[in-house]
Image: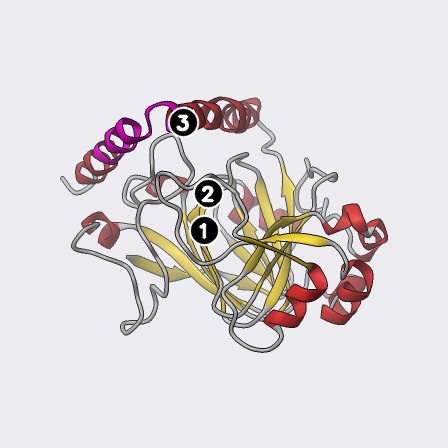
Amino acid sequence: MQLEAIPVFETIDPKQFKDEFYEPQKPVVIKNLARQWPAYSKWNWKYFKQLVGDKKVGLYNNTKSDAYTPINTADDYKTFGEYIDMISKGPAGWRIFLFNIFDHAPQLIHDFTWPEHLMKGFVKKYPMLFVGGETSITHMHFDIDLSHILHTQFVGRKRVLLFPFNEQYKLYRKPWEVLSLADFSNYYSPEKSKVDYEQFPALKYAKGYEVILEHGDTLFMPAGYWHHMEYLDSGFAMSLRALQPSLTGKLKGVWNLFGMRTIDTVMKKTVPKWWYESKKKKIFENANRTMI
């Protein structure tokens, strides 16, 4: 993989953000965007445990899904308080995916400000919390609705690997899905890396970005960007989603949600083996063409 560091700014002027990152669809980290929010100093494990410690949440382990794994099906369930206690004791490869904590504690919405000076179109009904224990992994994928994302880290550090959408075939995208067939776990560690360049040779030519997010850092992920995240510490982050301004961008997101995903689900249920084999063949055909 050919990786470069994501640009980092303490603060950024809206015009510079639009001209250099939003319009060209390039990622950037803004360190001070969230530091004026009450959430910056207020949100922590103890506070969340007091608010929603009794709420049951679905937990996801580090196992990479295969052709027969139901999408977004939890591997275990605990109360949020039990989960916090578990990941506070040390490495724990369990994460919470798309937890809408604001449904249970709506007062939290007053702890941050929607950064509409940078972009418009925020989907204000769905700010989402992402929580993970140290060593937990979010495997390589792109967000199905194709929204722009502002992802702010509040507790702990997280390593992020990003690729533009057009690198999809080098990343061995599964047809009709938002996932990569390859495993990027510990990609940065020669001793622990699961990246298999012999099986997936096109990965060597994929051009992307990497960064480590710390408390208060906000990452702008343009629509369709592939991302793989590894929790270096137990921590949590919040994503604010904004729809693409163009009608074409919005329609592509709608198609992914209600067309592409529905077709894939039906085929997995009716002809799973044939569907898997035909998709796998297409994956390698697409990847091989990028190396010609």
User: At label 1, which amino acid type do we have?
Assistant: His
- Identify the disc placed on residue 236: none
Q: Position of residue 110 (x, y in %)?
A: 84, 53
Q: Main secondary structure of the magenta part?
A: helix
Instruction: Compute the Cα span from label 2 to label 3.
Output: 23 Å
Q: Residue at x 17, y 39 (%)?
A: 288
Residue 38 appears anywhere in the view: yes
Q: Are marks 2 and 3 in contact (CB under 8 Å)?
A: no
Q: Earlier in the sequence, mark 2 or mark 1?
A: 2
Magenta region: which residues? Answer: 268-281
Q: Amino acid type of disc 3? A: Lys
Label 3 packing within 10 angstroms: few (<14), some (14-19), many (20+): few
Nearest to the eye among marks 2 and 3: give it. 3
Residue 237 pos. (x, y %): 63, 59
Q: Please tell me how crowded label 2 is: few (under 14), some (14-19), or many (20+) other residues with Cα within 10 Å.
A: many
Q: Secondary structure at mark 1?
A: strand
Which amino acid lies under the numbered mark 2 shown in the image of this protein?
A: Phe
Give the labeled residue for mark 1. 227
Does residue 8 lie above or below 128 as drawn?
below
Q: Which residue is mark 2?
A: 142
Most foreground residue, 223 or 89 = 89
**In which quadrant of the rendered image does the C terminus lie?**
top left
- Disc 2/disc 1 C-alpha distance (Å): 6 Å
Q: How is the image coloured?
A: secondary structure
Q: Compared with residue 266, is residue 82 higher up or lower down, i.e. above or below? A: below
Q: How many marks?
A: 3
Above or below, comparing residue 198 to residue 263 in the picture: below
- Magenta span includes 190: no
Q: Position of residue 27 (x, y in %)?
A: 50, 52
